[in-house]
Image: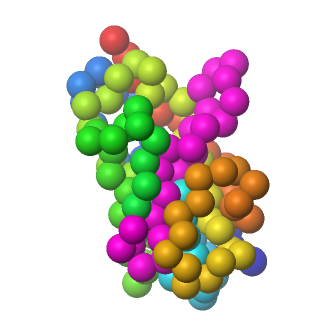
Amino acid sequence: QVQLVESGGGLVQAGGSLSLSCAASGRTFSRYAMGWFRQAPGKEREFVAAINWSGGKTYYVDSVKGRFAISRNNAKNTVYLQMNSLKPEDTAVYYCAADGSRPDSDYTPTREYEYDYWGQGTQVTVSS
């Protein structure tokens, strides 16, 4: 069982930066791929970024490439999402998720159903 707790959300002006963190419980965190998703008001939850168990592989949705960076520190059981050059359309609740079904894999899941564990989310609001 893995429990995930996001933090770091808030209000920022367009062009600004925020850094999200996702702290995980459970000794097997280091073996799981991790992902970030977001859900804007009135929209479906969408994939943002994923990282494999070692941190050696990452994948991003096109809309955030070059602006967002996902990373992880397995010693601290934490995954991060650094968000730069934020835009109003980045406003959403951001969720982290863990894929517990493919330990030690280089696969970076992009679909919701590929993730087994989810955090409660953290609000990110970007003002224009």
In this orientation, does residue 22 appear?
Answer: no
Please identify the quadrant where the C terminus is shown. Answer: top left
Q: Is residue 82 above or below residue 109?
A: above
Name, please, the residue furthest toward the bottom.
Answer: 27
Where is residue 32? Give x, y as percent: 58, 76
Q: Is residue 47 above or below residue 22?
A: above
- Image quadrant in which you'd find residue 113: bottom right
Name, please, the residue furthest toward the top.
Answer: 128
Where is residue 88? Give x, y as percent: 40, 19
Asked if residue 40 lies in the magenta stretch, the reply is yes
Q: Is residue 39 above or below residue 61?
A: above
Which residue is rendered at x = 36% and y = 73% of the image?
A: 56
Number of labelled discs?
0
Magenta range is: 36-57
- Image quadrant in which you'd find residue 93: top right
Please identify the quadrant where the N terminus is shown. Answer: bottom right
Which residue is rendered at x = 25% and y = 31% of the image?
A: 85
Q: Which residue occupies the foreground of this view, 124 or 63?
A: 63
